[in-house]
Amino acid sequence: MSEVFDVIVIGAGPAGENVLDRAVRGGLTAAIVEDRLAGGECSYWACIPSKALLRPVELAGEVARMPGMSLGPIDVDAVLARRDEAVSHYDDAGQVRWIEGVPATFVRGRGRLDGAKRVLVTEPDGSQRLLTARHAVVLATGSTAAIAPAPGLREAAPWTSHEVTAVTSVPGRLVVIGGGVVACEMAQAMHGLGARQTTVLVRGDTLLPRMEPFAGELLAGAFAAAGIDLRTGTEAVRVERPEPGGKVTVHLPDGPPVEADEILVATGRRPATEGLGLESVGLPGGESVEVDDSLRATGVAEGWLYAVGDVNGRNLLTHMGKYQARACGDVIVARAKGAPTTCPPCAPPPTATARRRSSSPTRRSAPSAGPRKRPAATGSGCARWSTTSPPSAAPTCSATAIRAGPRRSSTRIAGCCSVSPSPGRAPPSSCTRRPSRSPPRCRSSACGTRCRPSPP
């Protein structure tokens, strides 16, 4: 027999939890399915543990740079114990209690689509449980580490962000493949905690290629000062590990191979959609789920399937996934109640769900956007969600056309409200009109008509 809920969410990470919360606050019943730990990547294998590992290394480095100060070796066991405390010892009981207090039903197991509005869950003991949704199924399964196709690499059982942030002993020799944030952070953390022979292999010519060039240059200098061996313009062409857990040999295009005790692959992410049952509803498996601006999956009859966060491939950032999730939950509630889904009160603005791989152009990429574009433009439009409104309140809209730059100025929209992007200041929870010297151009409430930004 099937258990029936208004909304079923697959994936109990930050995005999934936010959808669940908004749906229940809107009066719907909901269940959420998770086969690992409720709370998701950031809580256990990303932001929190990585910073717990980096902070002691940072402090030790700061002390060492002060003349007259010295610090003995870092107590690695104490650092790892603090990391374990930060991730609740990989126990999600507290998070499950929160879900049940929403209130919602938590289902432990591997969920997959099994036809229209049906989710089949394989529980830890192998038994199966069928859930059926009245209104919507939301995919919030996130992403997983991408493994480069170098021969022998996958067979070498490389570390990903999961294994390196959950490390129980620091290897003496480490090879890191990648030059992004995860690669740089974990190379520094492991090197500072005892991996004295740390080699970083980067295919491109710089670290942090999505950031301004000076950031990668400064970090490369820090690597050199710390004794981290950074090699740009190279990659692994073959990897050998004859014995599980034994020595790793990484062959390069030129020069001798690099030997290490462990190898970390940090070359990007891919959507976690394999085995999700997308084929049962006519969508391709193993790919990002295409969605419209209301986060509803395209190409699915009756429009009951939604996808938020990394799984839709639009903005692979936790906070953007949570933002999408809140909008998605409100949209589902409105549609379930037959309410309109345009702003006001429910449709998310295109700038919130647009497909963008990075938050802003860099000096390297900005010229291609045209002479009037400049770095750090955050988009503009008349409608945006007020993310500081109380969760129980109806969503409110405000008008923004923010341009962040050296002057960090706010472009006002005549007759509408504007938000100042000053650091550390949250946007207002409601739309407060500000006077403008320009003639009014936006006459409807909540910015219902198209506005043109006036000069800053």
Image: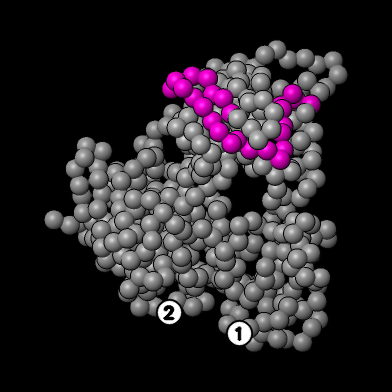
Seen from the viewer's position, the closer of residues 6 and 430 is 6
What span is in magenta? 225-250
Q: Residue 230 magenta-drawn?
A: yes
Residue 11, percent across and down? 38, 50
Q: Quadrant of the C terminus?
A: bottom right
Q: Quadrant of the N terminus?
A: bottom left
Which mark is drawn over residue 340? 2
Residue 330, percent across and down? 43, 67
Mark 2 nearby-residue class (10 Å; few <14, some 14–19, many ≥20): few
Residue 349 visible in the displayed image: yes
Gap between marks 1 and 2 measured at Cα? 16 Å
Mark 2 residue type:
Pro
Report which residue position mark 1 lands on.
Answer: 449
Residue closest to the far top: 72
Seen from the viewer's position, the closer of residues 73 and 233 is 233
Seen from the viewer's position, the closer of residues 276 and 34 is 276
Circles 1 and 2, Cβ within 8 Å, touching? The answer is no
Q: Residue at x 31, y 56 (%)?
A: 277
Say above or below: 67 vs 332.
above
Q: Secondary structure at mark 2?
A: loop
Quarter residue 221 falls in: top right
Mark 1 residue type:
Thr
Say above or below: 288 vs 246.
below
Which mark is drawn over residue 396? none
Residue closest to the far right: 67
Asked if residue 36 lies left or right of residue 412, the reply is left
Asked if residue 204 lies left or right of residue 271, the reply is right
Q: Residue 86 magenta-drawn?
A: no
